Amino acid sequence: MKFGFLAHPVNVAQRNEIRAGVLVAGALAERTGRPAPTRHLHLPAFADITSAAGAHCTGEVRYLPNTADELLGGRGAAAGFVVDQVRQLAANGADLVGLGGATSILGGRGVHTQQQVDIPLTSGNSLTTFAAHALVRTILARLGDHDEPVGIVGFPGAIGLAMARLLTDDGLPVVLVCRKGRVRVRDLRDELPATADATITDDVADCLGRTRLIVAASSAGGVLDPAAFRPGTIVVDVALPRDVRPGSTRRDILVLDGGLVSATDRVRVDGLDAGPTEQLNGCLAETMVLALDGRAESFSLGRELDVDRIRQIGAIAAHHGFVTAPPASNGRLVPLDRIAEVRGAARSAAGRFAANVNPPLADLYAAHGMDRVFTGGHGATLTTADGTDYLDFVAGYGCLNLGHNHPAATGAVQRFLASGEPTFVQYTSIPARTAELAERLCAITPGRLERVFFGNSGAEAVEAALKLARAATGRTRFVYAENSYHGKTFGALSVTGRSVHTGPFGPLVPDCVAVPFGDEQALRDAIGGAAAFIVEPVQGEGGVIVPPPGYLAAAARVCRAAGALLIVDEIQTGLGRTGTMFASDGVDADVLCLAKSLSGGLVPISATLATAEAWDAAYGTTSGAMLHPI
């Protein structure tokens, strides 16, 4: 018996290869005098098959030069083209023709195509459904959960409806997603047995929120966004075109190719061993199996697939040596252990980060192999749970000048917590520890700094400095350096000279002017009437840029002459980062900002130090004392 099959490329790149192949075949045919192919490429495979049971058939597979999206987008012309191709296969001696993917969707899932030709057709949806159902059962067995609800996207399409019936027959609860506006949801309940535990919705998000095992069978193309999946979601994507959008690198989800069949090593294809890992689409495999069994009949057509015939084609396939393919994703085999691992990843730190903190950053970490989780840190060494040590060359961008968990720092925190002293006394009494730290900082910082605000981050320290400058001078304008970085809060961004940070948030605080870093004359030209000039002693985020010698001291003189404050941002450079305690040693700043390593990386803390003169001008009254928290 001979079969024919109409396949199509799954993506544009494959389509272009096929079109190129048609052109080459046409050119060769013209040179040899043989007939040229008509808008298809003959695939010289599956021409001769012997099954495990000793049955034999021949075949002709044609690749059409259109993707599923293209075929479905031009249904009228495509339907006529498919009918023409079926007739050509029949003329070449085919006794049965299989319709693959989109070619079976055209014309009422093959029904209208069948009405126009005299040869039996099959969509292959029965064996595709059988294989997808078997894969779902494999997943549930691997997870050890035989009662997990299964979401089905594409109900009541042929495969979606059949999967719903099979899974509810298994006693599993299902959440079924139908297309909005096509039919009333409550009317679809009649498609299932009265005893079925089924929820029907037209909201994909509702299904994704209820389930973590999903069968995608809508063939609408890209209707499922991986970013919307719950951590631990496993999708069996049976659709052509695929329902799950490509490109995600999430480690806490798994998208498997659905509806695939493999030939055992007792099957011979074109005289070669097919091998147990060869993956065939169920639609092609069903056509082959029917031919091997001598069944020239329209086995799978229309929307309603008989559940008993689905099981029957599965048994026939097994008899001839075709079994459900092992799990695969984008054609690559997936170890069974990965199924359980993806659920474990959902409960891991990486999974929680991807789901609840920053999904794109989690994807970036995963793509570059940076999604490890450290469970220990001592000095310059970080350690993962498996005992692997890594040298930490980042050091929190200056937060860990003493390294991880320095005993002097951790010991001080532990002693304080063990002492039972109050940890929050703001506005109710004199905060003794705050006062002690302020005194120590004023003693070690350069210049005439005598007053200190405390905050939680470097950006907060900058915000405090900007507010103080406006309140002290009565002016509004700030001057800052190009290529600078001062933090991600609104005010700090307004004096940050890097568009990569500021771009999405404009318009920012008005009356902020940038000058070239290290250019004293540019500063002189811009500083008149300004409240302050804010500058880093060394630009860190901007690329570790050191200013010309004497620049900071000159900036202090220029600012003082103009009646503006000099704000030195030592958040990255301070506390020993540059070889001295402060990079601005010898510079008489009006305000100095500290953070990062101030606590040895143990607790969030920042400090904004100011001269008494500047602080008193801003807050040195009874009413002013409460304008900014200590």
Image: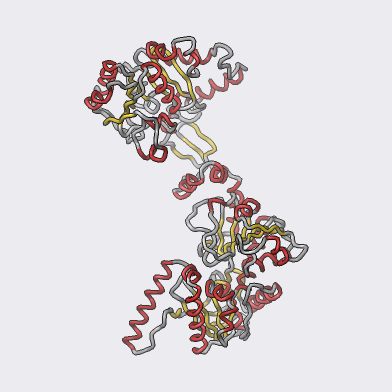
Q: In which quarter of the image is the N terminus?
A: bottom right
- Report whether residue 596 is seen: no
Please tell me whether residue 97 is drawn above or below residue 579 in the rendered image: below
x and y, in percent, of residue 541 in the image? 36, 34
Out of 440 and 522, give the one closest to the viewer.
522
Out of 411 and 346, give the one closest to the viewer.
346
479 displayed left or right of 361: left
* Residue furthest to the left: 521
Residue 38 picture quarter: bottom left
x and y, in percent, of residue 264 in the image? 58, 74
172 displayed left or right of 325: right
Residue 25 picture quarter: bottom left
Out of 368 and 505, give the one closest to the viewer.
505
Please tell me whether residue 365 is drawn above or below residue 145 in the rendered image: above
Residue displayed at 67% across by 62% down: 184
x and y, in percent, of residue 544 in the image? 32, 33
